[in-house]
Image (cartoon, rainbow, N blue to C red):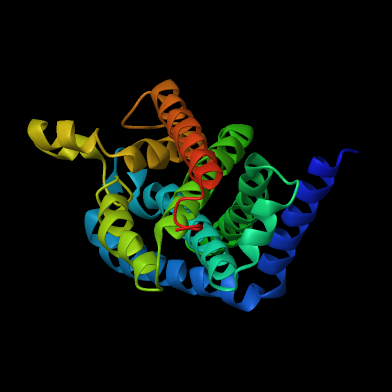
Amino acid sequence: MSPQMISMFALMRKETSRVLRIWVQTLIPPGITMSLYFIIFGTLIGKRIGEMDGYPYMEYIAPGLIMMSVITNSYGNVVGSFFNAKIQRHIEEMLVSPMDETSIVIGYLAGGIIRGLFVATVVSFIALFFTELNIKYPLLALLVIIMTASVFSLAGLINAIFAKKFDDIAVIPSFVLAPLTYLGGVFYTVSLLPEFWQTVSRLNPILYMVNSMRYSVLGTSDIEIVDGLLMIGGFFILLLSVAVYLLKKGIGIRD
């Protein structure tokens, strides 16, 4: 095995063990948060709404809540881990080592994907206490979770590259991710919106991720599943290219 592969797998193992080592911080909080969403939106509000797009409201929002947890946790895992590496200055050791930039990105990406998968599993088990969760296309659901976790892990990495202080890594989740997630069809179908706002909603990439997951679980979606997968794949390629480029240039690190 080449030194590049050895170093990449070592970083992947480090990031994966970090997720598991601090599982009280990485897995328990999203489980508690999603339980509250199920209780408030599913049980209390859902009884008044009844059905959404032909499904019980609790069952309808379950895929969206799973995807919400994947987005926030995969993003948060990488942005926190990489920013700590910058603060502690050991990211510079990786950049001057024979390890190439793509291997560094993949190593950090692995941690975000692993956390996304574990959190998705935890939230799915929680959902079973509130509603039925018969996944129609299991392999597609797994693919969507991995692809979405990859996209937001890369987004977190790019945010950490540019961040200069801890406040900088809180801006994107608060002012970008949260609004896009709530407006991404987690709690409703966009067909209920006026035509203008339906068009605006289709500019939101999270809509495609949420509905791809909903299609995987329920078989219903506001968008074509092919469009959803193409959107996620396109963002993955774009963000991967940007992350590798930024590391090669040393932007935000050698400044």
Q: Residue at x 33, y 55 (%)?
A: 177
Image coordinates of residue 152 in percent, x first then y, are 47, 49
Is 155 situated left or right of 248 in this image?
left
Is there any visible trace of residue 20 in the rendered image? yes
Please determine whether, in this image, residue 51 is positioned above or below residue 92. above
Q: Residue at x 48, y 56 (%)?
A: 75
Quadrant housing the N terminus: top right
Quarter-of-image position of residue 196: top left
Is there any visible trace of residue 131 in the rendered image? no
Quadrant housing the C terminus: bottom left
- The residue positioned farthest toward the right in the image shown: 1
Q: Nearer the viewer, residue 69 or 216?
A: 69
Is 115 situated left or right of 76 in this image?
right
Quarter-of-image position of residue 13: bottom right
Image coordinates of residue 115 in percent, x first then y, are 61, 58
Image coordinates of residue 210 in percent, x first then y, are 40, 42
Please determine whether, in this image, residue 154 is positioned above or below residue 226. below
Q: Residue at x 44, y 28 (%)?
A: 234
- The residue positioned farthest toward the bottom in the image shown: 24
Image coordinates of residue 238 in percent, x first then y, are 45, 33
Please determine whether, in this image, residue 28 is positioned above or below residue 73. below
Please determine whether, in this image, residue 34 is positioned above or below residue 50. below
